[in-house]
Image: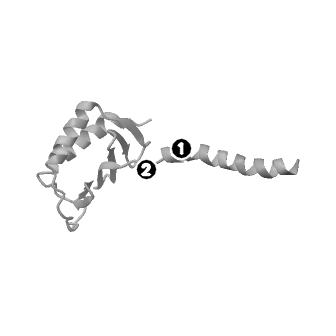
Amino acid sequence: MRIWRIVLLPVLLLALNTSMAPAQAEVAPKRALVDFRKQGGFAGLNDRVIVYGSGCVRLSRRTGPTIDKCLTAKEQRKLRGLLRGLRIGSSERPPQGADFIKYTLAYDHRRAARYRLPESWQPVVRLLDQIMEKYWAPD
């Protein structure tokens, strides 16, 4: 009877390990297509829009819940088209004074923070702001 226990225990452990492997593979991290933040000002803005390669977005603000939604096919096409013309460039130094809004944009393994929006950023930021207004709703 002991021999069966010795043989059965390793077989059961092997079966459990192989059945758990696919579940661990499913929780692979999502890859962000573009990450946008708008922070600062007297109002204390802290908005963030992350668009993943799958077309889904994660939206958050200083107050309220974090929202996960998926963009329409039209919105995805428009965003990808605008991203083709985006030039990240380099970060700006913070200006002297108060009430400035800091825009941080990360795309294609590059990240920069600006206080004045460059021309190539403007359509992308405008669309991401529209997405935030459309899909983020407080409880």
Within-10-Å neighbours for mark 1: few <14, some 14–19, many 20+: few
| Kind of residue at disc 2 | Pro
Q: Which of 91/81 is in front?
A: 81
What residue appears at the point 25 percent right and 38 percent down from the top-left corner?
A: 130
Within-10-Å neighbours for mark 2: few <14, some 14–19, many 20+: few
The extreme right residue here reads: 1
The extreme left residue here reads: 119
> Which labelled disc corresponds to residue 61?
none
Q: Which of 105/9 is in front?
A: 9
Question: What count of labels does the image hold?
Answer: 2
* Quarter of image, res 95: bottom left
Question: What secondary structure is marked by label 2?
Answer: loop
What residue appears at the point 69 percent right and 49 percent down from the top-left corner?
A: 13
Q: Which of 18/105 is in front?
A: 18
- Using the numbered discs, state the Cα–Cα distance from disc 2 to disc 1 in whole angstroms: 15 Å
Q: Which of 68/33 is in front?
A: 33
Left or right for 137, reference 3: left
What residue appears at the point 16 percent right and 54 percent down from the top-left corner?
A: 117
Earlier sequence position, callout 2 versus callout 1? 1
Determine which residue is flagged by label 2.
Answer: 29
Tell me where residue 139 appears, x and y as whole percent: 45, 35
Question: What secondary structure is marked by label 1?
Answer: helix
Left or right for 40, reference 81: right
Tell me where residue 8 appears, x and y as whole percent: 77, 47
Between label 2 and label 1, give the one nearer the viewer.
Answer: 1
| Kind of residue at disc 1 | Pro
Left or right for 54, reference 15: left
Determine which residue is flagged by label 1.
Answer: 22
Tell me where residue 48 appears, x and y as whole percent: 33, 49
Q: Which color scheme did the rendering employ for the protein?
A: one colour
